[in-house]
Image (spheres, rainbow, N blue to C red):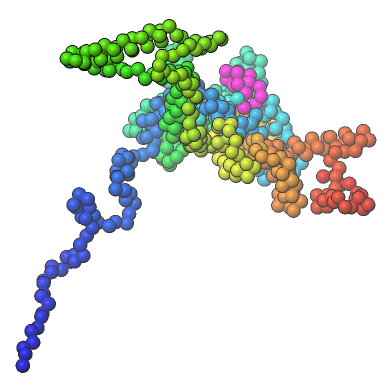
Amino acid sequence: MEETTMITKPKVRRKAGSQSIPAAIQPSGGVQRATSSYLRDTRSGVIQSRPAFLREHRDDIRQAWDRSAALAMDLIQNSGRLKGACDQIIADTVGTELTLNPQPDLTGLGYDDKERADLINLIKRRWKMYAWNPAECDLRGKLTIPQMADIGIRWFIAYGESTGVLSYMSQAQRRRYGITTGTKMLMVPPHRLSQETRETEGLYQGVFHDENGRATHYRFNTRESGVNVTADYAARDARGRSLVLHAFDPMDATDVRGISLLAPTFRKHIQHEILDDATLQMAVLQTIYAICLTSEKPSADAFEALEALSAIDGASPLATEFLNYFSGSLNAAAESSISVNGDPTVSHFAPGEKLSFESVKVPGGEYLPFADSLSRDMARALGITFGGLTMNYSQATYSSVRMETSSLWPVVLRRRERIAAPHYQMPYESWLDEEIGEGRIPFKGGYEAFDANRDRVCWALWQGPAKPTADDGKAAKAATERISNGTTTLAQECADLGLDADEVFQQREIEHKRYINAGMPSPFMRNMPSDPASADDDDEPVPTPQVV
């Protein structure tokens, strides 16, 4: 009987927690552990190669503010495209001006609807006369309120913020200038706001703060009679009325100052300028040297080789013949000429020479796509359309223009409310306070009632220009449809067009009565919007006209 051989599996003791499956081996030989987390880098280490440090955003602003402001001003002053972009931003945001639309809450103050409407109309008329009179609204007597807002937006683009100080003229000063109001606005360049920081005293980048982080004073480095003067201006007076205008768009909750809107675009804009300069220089060089003379003549190294060959026994006659041949060719070339002027002439060339005319090869096919990419980056940061920045609409369609405008219009509205409107609201509140206090605008209960309800009475909306449209006809039809189906109001449609609904109503009423009294058909007489006209109902009776 044969014996059966048993094969047993060897038992190997392994330490608990050890890994039985081999790990992936890195090229360097180390063990690469699989991870599932943020910042997982590529094999080339592209993330690791970009240094980044985390700190408070206001510290970044304080460190870069001076350099950013200087660069932004230099670029704007030396770039027609950026200058045009600034003008476009101002035009989109405020147009010619922001229109006052007072919204006082007069509940409990004894006003009925007619009295409220009369008060609003009086405020509008007097504000218009004040805001457009530089002698009345500007301490220097040079700028209107709309001009101050334009300057404030330019400062916001270049400096990232706009600053101003509210002042008040006494009766004696007013008599000196022959003016009525004492409320005056003084625009102060943001670079005059100190960069000084002493956090132990609550001073950070020129702004003093209390224990709750609220601004109490602003330190300005002004210039008086040729002498630099440092002065601290209170943020508010004893009654809580604002005295310093500081408009900026904070990125972080702890930001104290703003930074140039162009700061993220510096690199792209400078790269674009370098690209344009290099392309232009190459084009100029290729244009100047577009005529090339190609020759098969040997270089200086070949002549040195012939001289060395002449030193060899038996090779001297051959070298001499070559030198004589080239000498004759050069002599013949010296007698010929090439003239490129009003009377171009070309003589015979030496053997092996060829004249060619080269064409300009720049900009190449990659220039425009790359330049457009840089421009789109800048347009996005500035909050304007690509066409508005470059005036290039070659690839634009109706749908693309509509989508581009629709996506950027909320940015315009946001800039209008947060940057432009404070340049109107702050002097408006102080002006209205003075008008009621000195009796030029009557108010029930007198100044005491107004002072007790200041915020409610001073509330106002500021309406700007209408949203741009690619097709005014389609936009008008859409507005008509919204009114017809009751999804909007005339007041809302007027606001979207940058118009005051009350002023539109009053003007239409005046014109309508004028036409009727003159026996002429009024242009405001039409069918009801719910009964659209049809091309097939010519025989139908004409409905009675209604006044809308």
In this view, 365 is above or below 35: above
Q: Nearer the viewer, residue 466 or 406?
A: 406
Image coords of residue 417 (percent x, y): 57, 38
Quadrant of the image containing the N terminus = bottom left
Quadrant of the image containing the C terminus = top right
Q: Is residue 315 left or right of residue 10?
A: right
Q: Nearer the viewer, residue 288 or 178?
A: 288
Residue at the (46%, 12%) spot, across then down: 348
Does the magenta portion include 466? Answer: no
Image coords of residue 28 (percent x, y): 20, 49
Image coords of residue 536 (percent x, y): 88, 52
Residue at the (37%, 34%) spot, across then down: 60
Q: Is residue 151 visible?
A: yes
Per the rendered image, the range of residues in magenta is: 131-146
Q: Nearer the viewer, residue 56 or 71?
A: 71
Q: Quadrant of residue 401?
A: top right
